[in-house]
Image (cartoon, grey):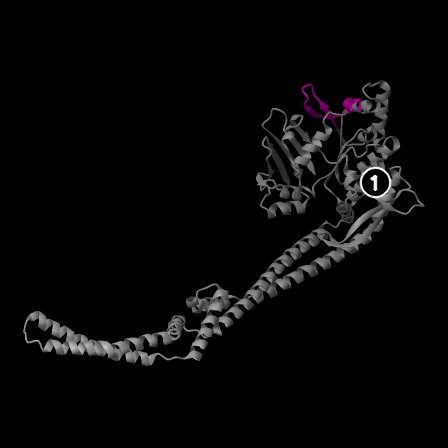
Amino acid sequence: MLTQLNICNFVLVENLEIAFDPGMTVLTGESGAGKSILLGALGLVLGARSTKRDIRAGAGRCEISAEFSIGDNEAAQSYLEQLDLADTTTPQRCIVRRVVRTDGRSQAYINTSPVNLNVLAEFCSPLIDIHGQHEHQRLLDGRTQLAWLDDYSANNEILETVTNAFSLWRTAKADLEILQLDSQARTERSDLLHYQVAEIKSLGLNEGEVENLDTTYKRLSQAKEIRSTIEKIDQSIRDRLLPETTQWNRDLQEIKDDHAALTAARELLNSSEIQLLEAESELRGYAETLEIDEQGLTDLGQRLTAIHDVSRKHRVKTTELVRHQKALEDELDSMSVDEQQLSTLTQEVEQHEALFRQEAAKLSSTRKKHAVDFERDVCSTLARLSLPGVRLTLEFDEAESDTGLETIQYLIATNHPNPPGRLQDIASGGELARISLAIQVVAAERSMLPCLILDEADIGVGGTTADIVGRMLQKLASHTQVVCITHAPQVAALANVHMKVEKLKHQDTSVKKLSGGGRVDELARMLGGRTVTDETRDFARTLLADTHT
């Protein structure tokens, strides 16, 4: 239950401390006094969105804290222990706190540890429920309708199992799909690599072979031209140079002079003749190696063309094809789809799905089992709220989600002959408000919610109906802490604790607990307006006297 709310510099509130008791507490006061501001502060500390406008004018920040008693709430204690957020000295209590700064940023705390808003909201959600002035709008939301039936059916434990199983199933399924896509990509890459390796292998290349093929091709393609050149040189040496050199040697030998220059010239010329003979012999030997092989040249050209085509496809030089083939083979060897991981993850998906469907089927069964009683109890409560002709029907539709195997829609019939229809199509605004209140009360009676806060849930009702609302809340308060902001004196008179909200002269909001004459005067004000008379005081005393009748 909620035991304390501390507010500092929130909107119109400078400093305010409110202690809450078990049972039913009402907050009353004139319009504009700041009653709903208190709920705004509480909503903020429970995880609602914050803005700079939450901060009181002139202040540097606002701070709200709420203290809960969780001594008999094993789920809350377990949650805090799992996240290492429990107060080790007093584990039966928990303080949640929210600080909002002028730059719009905020920080949340559970006990003394900072937490994100998701953790804050997740922890607080089972502890307290706020039924605001516009709560009936939530009544039109399918997930809210399903949640209220689950509250009534006390499905929290199995619903948590279903939600966790669905989350695990969805996560494992997503991981499996990623792995399968990766496996498919690997398979496609492997197929490509096999094709590329086979394509290069079909060439039968050896290291350095391309260079040799290029050299051979150039030589063969130039063989005719080279042989013709060799033949011309050989003929020139044989027919012209050698005869002339031989004749020159003879002519020099006939000169009878031992002059050194002449002797040197004779030796050089004789050497030239010998070198010409040797050159002619080498040229003839080289010419014999030049084969004119047209078919061989064609075949070699075709092979080189095939090599160049493959190199262009692989975007590498022809001389790098052998190394490229080795690199592709290495990549192929390193690629292996983890079949074991695929198998394990597939089993996990199947197990999580089976658990989800098994537990969701149980959840569906208990929902449908309690739906009839829920319809009956809500209709009975509506009759007490002066809506005797209203019939509520729950319609289930199949749909898989984290809430189970179905969605739900509340159908309403306000006149007996007419078939039921959607709430937004059938019910008026006033009817929606009372339908919402009836459902909240019926659900809370079965769910054992620790604390229910109602912001003018009794708006639009008065007289006997207001008295009925008050007695419904009084009954609910026997096991659920009820805090109610109300303008109905009939409701206020039935509370265990009566608090009055006032706005002081400095536009500051204050709250004080009423008793005795102060409570009588406040009830008299609610009955007669600003003018409090002996008659309205007597009526107020009568209301208080009727509290337990």
Q: For the point 90% across and 47% down, which residue is it?
A: 419
The quadrant where residue 6 appears: top right
Badge 1 marks a residue whose secondary structure is helix
On the picture, is 88 further left or further right than 165?
left
The quadrant where residue 48 appears: top right
On the picture, is 170 further left or further right than 261?
right
Q: Residue 259, image x and y in percent? A: 6, 71
Q: For the point 44% across and 75% down, which residue is it?
A: 300
Query: Closer to the camera, 102 or 12?
Result: 102
Q: For the point 85% across and 42% down, which residue is it?
A: 425
Specify whether residue 509 is painted magenta: yes
Query: Closer to the camera, 311 or 391?
Result: 311
Specify whether residue 505 is painted magenta: yes
Q: Residue 485, image x and y in percent? A: 76, 31
On the picture, is 72 further left or further right than 308?
right
Q: Residue 216, image x and y in percent? A: 38, 74
Q: Residue 354, image x and y in percent? A: 70, 61
On the picture, is 361 further left or further right than 116?
right
Q: How many marks?
A: 1
Query: Closer to the camera, 416 or 361?
Result: 416
The amino acid type found where label 1 is placed reads Ile
Name the quarter where the N terminus is drawn.
top right
Name the quarter where the C terminus is drawn.
top right
Q: In this view, does 71 lie above or below 300?
A: above
Q: Which residue corresponds to mark 1? A: 435
Give neighbour class at mark 1: few <14, some 14-19, many 20+ (Cα, 10 Å). Answer: many
The quadrant where residue 349 appears: bottom right
Residue range in magenta is 499-521
Q: For the point 85% across and 50% down, which residue is it?
A: 372
Query: Closer to the camera, 188 or 305?
Result: 305
Could one spot residue 477 in this view of the protein?
no
Looking at the image, which residue sits at the far right? 417
